[in-house]
Amino acid sequence: MRAVRREGMLMVLRPRVGLRSSPSTNNKWTTTWVNTYAAVTSTQQTWALEQQVSLAAVAAPTGNEGPRARAMQQGLQQAGARACHLDAVGNVCASFGEGKDAPLVCLAHLDTVYDAGPPQDGVVAVHRHATRLRAPGIGDNSRGLAAMLLLARVLGLPDVRTQLRRPVHLVATVSEEGEGNLRGARAWFDAAEQRGVVPYAAVAIDGPGDESIVHHAVGSHRLRVTVHGDGGHSWVHADAANPIHVLGEFIARVSRLGDARRRDAVVHITRMQGGESLTGIPQRAWVDVDLRGTSAARIDAVRRELMRLVQQLTPPTLRAEVTIHGDRPAGSLDDAHPLVDAARRATEAVGVTPRSASASTDANIPLSRGIPAIAIGAGGCGGGAHTSEEWYDDTTGARGLTRLLRLVLDLAVTA
Ligand SMILES: [Zn+2]
């Protein structure tokens, strides 16, 4: 999960599949039943933490998740998943229940961002200081994966499995982070669409925490603008057009777009490079642009403005080339949507005040396709995500696990 923050006015995407309000609050039997199976014991909390530590120790940088995927597959099988396989892109897929209703999908990403470079021999050291654990990926997303294993254990209980009115698919996804571009989630939902499966809802389990409900998916569009020319001697060919000067003007215009930006779209030049020598007119220069927003329409409008600027600023003697480096679709669920409401009730049930949030997670994919989706944390607290100093504290870990189990059981059994 990345860059969670509150949002003001946001686009509301009308889902193809509407959720009905859960009747669980009116049904004493199901409420008692959910209370029984969702209450996480201290033994379960300890077990989940052990799974989290052993998964964090298996390196899984984006694009190289194989060893962790196999560990996760083994964990899901041991937890009671009958059919558990790796799909074509390396996602670990397990299912529970044979209910005929549209399935519920829970996603947790396998990959980790390593700022400190690749670990030695595929093993990541997990350090312990009192109640605090430190390792890259310990929270984002070893915590989410451990919560998924606990979820599998509960869904695998005969008394729970037989009550599921809809199948629950657990999917540990590859390539959620950075330039992975949500490849795993995209592939899973593509395959479901090809099979004619329209999920009832999707819940991404991402990182620690037990209060935020991400129902605004931050989309992004990353592109590189490269300007090519003949170059030349900076005195002899003084009239030759200069790619760096063109990009300098482009940067200035983009920064002014920023002045007028609205909260639903943000654009930044994030990297630049160019030139071959101190005394020559460059033959090539480039800049990277990172455009983000919660509204697909706004992202598209700013993207078109960037293209217009490139065209307008490039003289006929130079050649501009735009390459796409990433594209994550945006989407949003209204505050009053039944899925958001179900998550809010599950949060309040564990004594926590729910908070709306926006982020870029695996939930972007279903949301952008009209499938109701949210992302929530997997309990405990943490910080330093995407750095080598990432930490996690399990003191309140049981609370977030209970919230997740309540939500899933509510959606899969009573909704
Ligand atoms: Zn994450």
Image (cartoon, grey):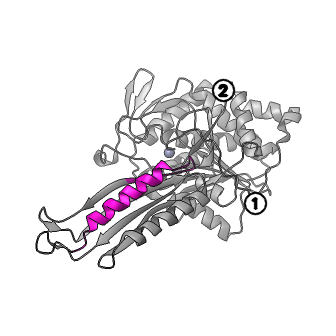
Q: Nearer the viewer, residue 372 or 299?
A: 299
Residue 340 position, x and y percent, is 71, 42
Residue 150 position, x and y percent, is 60, 39
Quadrant in which the C terminus is drawn: top right
Image quarter of residue 94: bottom right
Instruction: Tell me the residue that label 2 is attached to.
Output: 352
222 left or right of 121 in image: right
Q: Nearer the viewer, residue 371 or 258?
A: 258
Q: Amino acid at mark 2?
A: Val
Q: Amino acid at mark 1?
A: Arg
Query: Magenta part of the protein: which range?
Result: 240-269
Q: Nearer the viewer, residue 216 or 366?
A: 216
Instruction: Tell me the residue that label 1 is attached to.
Output: 16
The residue shown at (73%, 28%) is: 349
Distance between the alpha carbons at the discs numbered 2 and 1? 31 Å
Q: Most extreme residue toward the bottom, as rendered?
A: 316
194 left or right of 391 in image: right
The residue shown at (73%, 55%) is: 103
Whether residue 297 is situated above or below residue 35 in the rendered picture: below
The residue shown at (49%, 44%) is: 2
